Image (cartoon, rainbow, N blue to C red):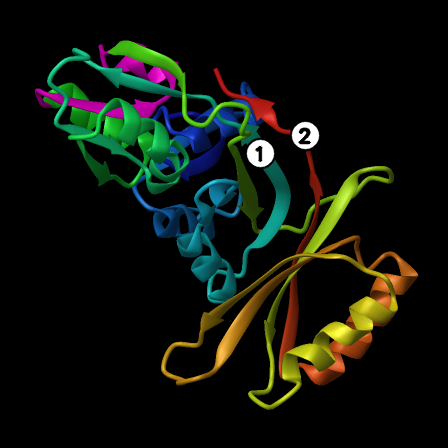
Amino acid sequence: MSSKQKIIYLGPEGTFAFCTAEKRFAGQYEFVPATTIRGVFDGVSKDRLSLGVVPIENSSGGTIYETVNQLVDQSFGLFIQESLSMNVKLALLGKNKEGIQVIYSHFAPLVHCENWLRSKFPNAQLSEEKSTATAVLRASKEENTAAIGTRDAAKKYNLTVLEFPIGEENMQNITQFFVVGHEKALLRPGDNLKTSFVVVLPNEPGGVVNFLEPFKDEKINLSRIISRPIWGQPESYVFLIDILGTEQEEKVKVAVEKAGKVAISMKNIGSYPTTEAYASE
């Protein structure tokens, strides 16, 4: 049995979550795949020494709401420890370029490459899978299919790289990931820092505006604000909010104190560094 700490990621091996985790943590951890984002959070919650790597946003496909749902579900008690990202370059993988009837991938690559796919393979069905790796695995077992994934995945699943790179020319395809764990991150001066909050606001006119006003007054930038319905409470919402900076800064501390008085509840779920995007293979 391995004595290394675990990185639990959205698998199987070969997903962009795996590639990002490997670039960040290679040699330090044992990598353990989970079949769903919920599975990542479940696995980390049961092992205090482990960390999880989950996608939160793709620049083409948008927000990964399954991750948002788990972050705002406070039953896990986990903190965001780091923000990682990858500049994803995609490949079309398959056995043969002729006769392709179905193209599999995760929804974000399908969105990013849709125009390219429609022009190259107008008669092919685009079919969503849980991850790029599961898409490649499926294409490896079926005839007249292809998948969008990494060139490394082609080697693993014995497929051919039919075209690379694919998608819109000159358009970056950045996927952002959160590293989650039981402890708060150790912050260093000079890091590019953000803080995330889970917030419940009163369902009344001006509730959101009143909450945001202190951040405007203190000139604090909000980089993300996402609402999700509260289960079992119609027309009630919980928000995931990211700001630039941390409560170690006086202006952030002042804004958070004022905004907290407006909110029904407001919990800091992590102050963490953000890093430059890795390049995919």
Give amino acid for label 2.
Answer: Glu
Q: Where is residue 180 in the image (x, y as percent from the top left)?
A: 55, 47
When the figure is inspected, residue 257 is found, relative to residue 35, above or below; the finding is below
Q: Do residues under tags 2 and 1 come within 8 Å of each other at their CB atoms?
A: yes
Residue 155 lies within the magenta run: yes
**Mark 2 vs mark 1, CA separation in Å:** 7 Å
Segment colored magenta? 142-159
Label 1 sits on a secondary structure element that is strand
Residue 53 vs residue 92: left or right?
Answer: right
In this view, the residue in front, 153 or 75, is 153
- Per the rendering, the mark at residue 85 is 1
Q: Residue 64 carries which label?
A: none
Q: How many marks are shown on the rendered structure? A: 2
Q: Residues within 10 Å of mark 2 (few under 14, many from 20)?
A: few
Q: In this view, which residue lies farthest toward the right?
A: 250
Query: Up-down: is 26 above or below 214?
Result: above
Of residues 147 and 23, the one drawn nearer to the viewer in this rendering: 147
Q: Mark 2 points at which residue?
A: 276
Q: Is residue 259 left or right of residue 73?
A: right
Instruction: Residue 145 in the image: state x and y as whole percent.
Output: 15, 23
Q: Which amino acid does label 1 sit on?
A: Ser
Q: Nearer the viewer, residue 95 or 17?
A: 95
Q: Position of residue 222 (x, y in %)?
A: 71, 59
Residue 219 at what x, y percent from top left? 86, 62
Q: Residue, x 77% and y 57% (percent of image)? A: 221
When the figure is inspected, residue 8 is found, relative to residue 218, above or below; the finding is above
Q: Is residue 12 visible?
A: no
Q: Is mark 2 on a helix, strand or loop?
A: loop
